[in-house]
Image (cartoon, grey):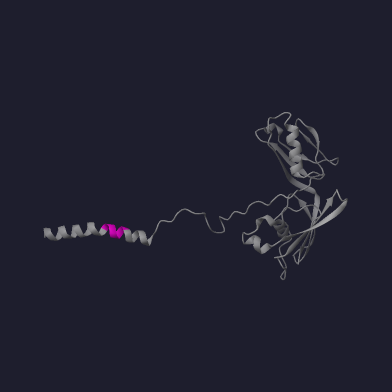
């Protein structure tokens, strides 16, 4: 009896490495990787494209590590905003980037290397126009920084035969050097965007933009 038990014990000991190898082949370790699935996909924020400040808009201004300088201010009819230390600052007609630079220079008289942030939180002065194959056409107030995708959602989406791959944003800007208007046509491909491609095309809309869905 003892020789039999001894043989079985030897057999089990010799079989353990083979069993471990087989189990390793069946369930190989997976290296960590990015999460997948619709719940984990992150869509980056839209690219700011030179939003121009106008009267009645509301701006949030902050200076890093300087809470006493933070302010939520409305642009007055004279184009001015009132800020701590600086009093009245002209803001109308500037882009948020231009105003940020201007405030950085002004606050530098009081704060060492200020890091200034300017965010439009309410846009009451500006509108865009949407036409074509959408559920609801017409004039849309911006109200706040608004992207192409957000405007399409406001309009209730596309109609049955819409060509969502070739949406056009027609934008008019002023060229002061030539003293004339310049018309630019930008493109938005809805299919690419929802497939997580070409996120940069989901731009912030500007006052007076015409969006056409063929």
Give the side of residue 13 with respect to residue 123, left or right. Answer: left
Q: Quadrant of residue 90?
A: top right
The region drawn magenta spans: 16-20
On whether residue 110 falls in the magenta region, the answer is: no
User: Residue extending furthest right?
Assistant: 179
Query: Observer-nearest residue: 1 or 31?
Result: 31
Location of residue 121 in the rendering, given as x and y in whole percent from the top left corner: 73, 45
Location of residue 203 in the rendering, given as x and y in whole percent from the top left corner: 71, 54
Give the side of residue 211 with respect to residue 36, left or right. Answer: right
Query: Observer-nearest residue: 135 or 46?
Result: 46
Q: Quadrant of the C terminus?
A: bottom right
On whether residue 17 falls in the magenta region, the answer is: yes
User: Residue extending furthest bottom?
Assistant: 161
Image: 147 above or below 85: below
Q: Quadrant of residue 6?
A: bottom left
Location of residue 119 in the rendering, given as x and y in whole percent from the top left corner: 72, 43
Residue drawn at x 36%, y 61% is 25
User: Residue extending furthest top?
Assistant: 110
Location of residue 95 in the rendering, given as x and y in whole percent from the top left corner: 77, 45
Residue drawn at x 59%, y 54% is 42
What is the magenta segment's predominant secondary structure? Answer: helix
Count every numbered label the image shows and give the total: 0
Q: Quadrant of the N terminus?
A: bottom left
Q: Quadrant of residue 69?
A: top right
């Amino acid at each position: 009896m003892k020789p039999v038990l001894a043989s079985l014990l030897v057999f089990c000991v010799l079989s353990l490495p083979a069993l471990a190898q087989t189990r390793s082949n069946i369930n190989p370790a997976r290296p960590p990787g990015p999460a997948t699935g619709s719940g984990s996909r992150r869509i980056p924020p839209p690219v700011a494209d030179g939003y121009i400040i106008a009267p009645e808009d509301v701006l949030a201004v902050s200076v890093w590590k300087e809470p006493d300088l933070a302010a939520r201010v409305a642009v007055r009819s004279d184009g001015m905003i009132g800020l701590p230390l600086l009093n009245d600052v002209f803001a109308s007609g500037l882009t948020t980037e231009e105003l940020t630079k201007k405030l950085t220079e002004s606050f530098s008289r009081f704060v060492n290397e200020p890091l200034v942030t300017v965010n439009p939180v309410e846009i009451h002065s500006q509108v865009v126009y949407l036409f074509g194959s959408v559920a609801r056409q017409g004039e849309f107030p911006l109200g706040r920084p608004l992207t192409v995708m957000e405007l399409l959602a406001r309009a209730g989406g596309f109609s049955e035969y819409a060509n969502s791959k070739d949406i056009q944003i027609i934008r008019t800007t002023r060229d002061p050097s030539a003293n004339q208007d310049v018309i630019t046509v930008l493109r938005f491909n809805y299919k690419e965007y929802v497939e997580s491609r070409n996120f940069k095309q989901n731009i912030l809309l500007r006052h007076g933009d015409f969006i056409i869905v063929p």
